[in-house]
Amino acid sequence: MTPRYPLAATLYPYARVPAQDAAPVRHPVVIVGGGPVGMALALDLGRKGTPVLVLDDHEGVGQGSRAICFAQRTLDIAHRLGPGARMVGKGVVWNVGKVFHGEERVFEFDLQPEPGHRHPAFINLQQPYFERFLVEAIRDAREEGAPIEIRGANAVTGLTRHADHVALDIDTPDGPYAVEADYVVACDGARSPVRGMMGLGFDGRVFEDNFLIADVRMTADFPTERWFWFEPPFEGAGQSALLHKQPDDIWRIDFQLGWDIDRAAELDPARIRRRVDAMLSSRTGTVPDYDLDWTSIYTFQCRRMHAFRHGRVLFAGDSAHQVSPFGARGANSGVQDADNLGWKLDLVLKGQAPDALLDSYSSERVAAADENILASSRATDFLTPKSDASRLFRDAVLTLARDHPFARPLINSGRLSVPRVYDGGALNGPDALDGPAISCVGAPCPDAPLDAGFLLDRLGGGFVILTVDAEAPARVEEEGIVATRLALTTRDHDPTGALRARYLGGAASGVWLIRPDQHVAARWAHYDEAALRRALRIATGREAGP
Amino acid sequence: MTLTLSPNIPDPDGFYDELLAAHEGLTAEESAALNARLILLLANHIGDRDVLRAAFDAARRPSE
C-alpha cells in the first residue's frame, strides 16, 4: 500500500493480528480514520469502557501544521479526556493581532483572556502534536484498562450494510481480511472513502478556494503576533494573507490564491520563497533568515452531507461537513462531533438507551454544521467580495476602522469556533429557570472557577444534577441511567462570583440536568423529581421533548 | 422604535446643501465610497436593527 501523504511520526506501525487469519470478528464500534476526530472519539468511548477498534490506512500522523488553531471548547473536551494539559503546555497563546489593508495598518487589537476559565480562547498548535497527544492519552488509558485498539496500515476497501451489522473489507501489507461492526463511524476526512463506498454525496457547494500554506522555521526575533492582510500589497499574494506563530519557532503563513490556479507552478519553492520574502520584509524592510519546513496547497469547500447518520454508519468531522479555514471551524467542530457522539454510542451499546438516540447525533450536529457554514460563508463574503456593492462596503469598513472603533467588529477575517447551542434540540427538556442565556438549555456548560478547581472538572462525563443553592437527592436512577448530584452553593463554592453570573443571573436558586457531553439538558428553579425523570428520558431518546 | 418617515430634519434646504457639499469634487467612484462610509456611520448611530431593516425595505421599494 502506498501512503497518500508523508508522515511526521510513526505512532502505530502495522502489526499482524490473529483476526486476519480467522473468521470475521464482530466489534461494537469500528472507527475508520485515526485523525483528531477518530482518536478523540476512540478515547472517549474507551474511557467509558466500550470496546473500540480504530482502522487507519496510515501508521501515524501526517506532516504539516494543517489545523493549527484549537479553541477553548476543544481544549475543555481534551482536558476531560486527558491530554488537555499537554496541548496547552505545548501550544502558543498570542494576544496581539494586527490587521492590514494593502499597505495601510487598519488597527491593532490585544485579546485579553476572559477571566474564570481554565483554558484560553484558543491555542496555536500543529495538528501532528494534537494527534500525537491524543494517541499518547489512548496509550495511557489502555494501560488503565480502556479497551481501545488501533490498527495502522489497515485500509477499508469495502463496506456492506446488513440489518444487524456492517461488514468491512480491509487491506493490509499482508493482504485482505474482514471485520464486522455493530456501528461504524467514518472519520476518514474530506475525501471519505467510506462515504464514496456508500454512494453518498453533499448538499450544496457554497464556496471554494485555494490556499497556499507554508510552515516557515525562523529563529529571528519576530513578534508573536497575528498579522492579517486584506488585499496584501506583496506581489501575487492573492486576496488575503495570514501570518501567525506556532510552537518550535515555526510560523504559519496562508496565502488565499483564488480558484483558478496552476497548482504545480504555485508549489515551486522559488516562487513560494519570493512571496514569503515579500511578506516577512513588508513591515521591517529586511528578510530574516528562514527555512521552508512544509508547504501545501489546500482546497476547501463549504458543504455538508444531508444527514450524518445512515443506519449503522455515522459520519463525523470533515467526512460529514467542510468549511472554509476562517475561524478554525474544521477540526474544532469535528472534535465537537466526537464529543456529541461518544456518550450516545456508549449508552446505546450498553443497552441503556434506544438506538433512536443516535438520530439526535445527526440532527444536533447538522445544525452545528449549518452554523459553521454560515459563519464561514459570511467571512468569505467579507474577504472576497462577490459584487461591486459588497466590495464598496468592505473597503468602507476597513477605512473607517482605522479611526473609529465602531467599525472594527464589522471586520470579518473569520469568527473563531464556538460550540453550537442545541436550540430546540431533540434531547432538550424544559427551560424553566429565568437564568442567563449562556447556560440555557442546549448550551455547553460555561466553566467557572470554584473554591477548588474548575466546574467542568467536577461535572465529569456522566449525567449530573447540578444544584446551586437548591436541594436535590444525591442520585437519581431512571431505567438504568444514573444522574449524580453536584451540590454547590454561592456562599461556599463561588469565590469569584462567576458561578452566580454564568448560571443563576438574577435567580435565587437553580437545578440543571447536565448531559455527559456537558451540554445543559434542562434547568429549573427548584428540584422536581417527576420533571427530572422526564428530562432524563428525553435526554436519552426514550421520550419526545416538551 | 419605528423608522421615522415624517419630516425630522430642521432646515431641510441647509441639510441638502451640506449633503451635496460633502460630495463636491469627488468622482463617481469616490462618491460611492463616501456614501458607503456614511451609511455605516449612520447605521451605527441608529443601532436599532428593526429600524435599520425598515429603512432597507423603504429604500428598496420606493413608490412609482
Image: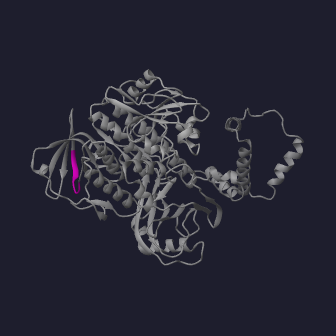
Tell me if residue A268 comes above or below residue A483 in the rendering.
Answer: below
Residue A543 in the figure: left or right of residue A222: left
For residue A330, say whether it is visible.
no
Q: Nearer the viewer, residue A474 or A479?
A: A474
In this rendering, the count of numbered labels is: 0
Measured as percent of width and height from the top left, residue A262 is found at 42, 64
**What residue appears at the point 59 percent right and 30 percent down from the top-left corner?**
A508
**What residue appears at the point 57 percent right and 65 percent down from the top-left corner?**
A232
Q: Nearer the viewer, residue A391 or A527?
A: A527
Measured as percent of width and height from the top left, residue A336 is found at 41, 45
Residue A285 in the figure: left or right of residue A521: right
Per the rendered image, the range of residues in magenta is A151-158
Measured as percent of width and height from the top left, residue A246 is found at 46, 64
**Which image quarter holds the N terminus of chain A?**
bottom left
Residue A28 in the figure: left or right of residue A221: left
- Asked if residue A155 lies in the magenta stretch, the reply is yes
Q: Residue furthest front?
A: A492
Measured as percent of width and height from the top left, residue A401 is found at 68, 56
Tell me if residue A533 comes above or below residue A302 in the rendering.
Answer: above
Q: Nearer the viewer, residue A391 or A433?
A: A433
- Locate residue A484: give its quadrant: top left
Q: How is the image coloured?
A: one colour
> Main SS type for the magenta part?
strand
**What residue appears at the point 49 percent right and 49 percent down from the top-left corner?**
A417
- Asked if residue A482 lies in the magenta stretch, the reply is no
Q: Nearer the viewer, residue A93 or A63?
A: A93
